[in-house]
Amino acid sequence: MIEQNTPSAGHVRLIDLPVVTDPRGDLTFIEGERHVPFPIRRVYYLYNVPVDAERGGHAHRDLEQVVFALSGSFRMKIDDGKTKSEYWLRDPRKGLYINRLIWREMDSFSQGAVCMVLASHPYDENDYFREYDDFIAAVNEGVK
Ligand code: T46
């Protein structure tokens, strides 16, 4: 479970969600400000993704998100402007929390993969850094 205080910019980590298991199957639930550190203002999901597709390729100025593989798997490449890492998401009980000012790229989607994202704000194109150089400049300036 995630702590309540707001992580600093550039912060990424895996969070574990509760699971209720009985003979009928598994049930996982998510409550905003409890299991994720923000009120959930938007939910979107990616599906019918071709296995050779690449998504992402941007960062956000303010947005916080938690990304899940509800079904199948995919890779998330993470870059905080100084350090690069990668996460394979394949367990619907684990979400990847991504704070603002993180460059992310997604690829290697398995056939039929479904990616669900919980977001802290409604969609706003002005919140995106779509050029890597702009992202790096923002990181270096500590821009909010
Ligand atoms: C992220 C990864 C995981 C909307 O109209 N509303 C929305 O809520 C979203 C997310 C997108 N759009 C429009 C904007 C573009 O015209 O859908 C189109 C594709 O969006 P984008 O290129 O941002 O999609 P992805 O899959 O590359 O990235 C998205 C999120 O933008 C991003 O924050 O982390 O999914």
Image: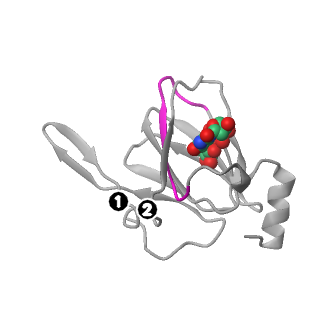
In front here: 19 or 101?
101
Residue 90 is left or right of residue 50, and the answer is left
The residue depicted at 77 percent of the width and 60 percent of the height is 81
Could you tell me residue 109's position as x and y percent? 56, 30
Q: Is mark 2 within 8 Å of ligand 1?
A: no
The residue depicted at 46 percent of the width and 52 percent of the height is 95
Residue 33: image quadrant is bottom left
**Mark 2, residue position:** 36
Could you tell me residue 65's position as x and y percent? 54, 55
The residue depicted at 45 percent of the width and 32 percent of the height is 72
Q: Which residues are magenta?
A: 108-121
Residue that lies at the very extreme toward the bottom in this rendered image: 5
Q: Are marks 1 and 2 in contact (CB under 8 Å)?
A: yes
**Mark 1, residue position:** 31
In front here: 67 or 83?
67
Up the image or down, 46 lies above or below 99; here it is: above
Residues under labels 1 and 2: Cα distance? Answer: 7 Å
Q: Quadrant of the N terminus?
A: bottom left
Could you tell me residue 30's position as x and y percent? 35, 55
The amino acid type of the residue labelled 2 equals Val
Q: Tell me, for residue 98, which label it has, or none.
A: none
Q: Quadrant of the C terminus?
A: bottom right
Could you tell me residue 17's position as x and y percent? 35, 55
The residue depicted at 39 percent of the width and 43 percent of the height is 92
In front here: 31 or 107?
31
Would you say residue 55 is visible in this rendering? no
Residue 7: image quadrant is bottom right
Instruction: Please state the quadrant of the image where ligand 1 appears.
Output: top right
Badge 2, how many Cα within 10 Å: few under 14, some, many 20+? many
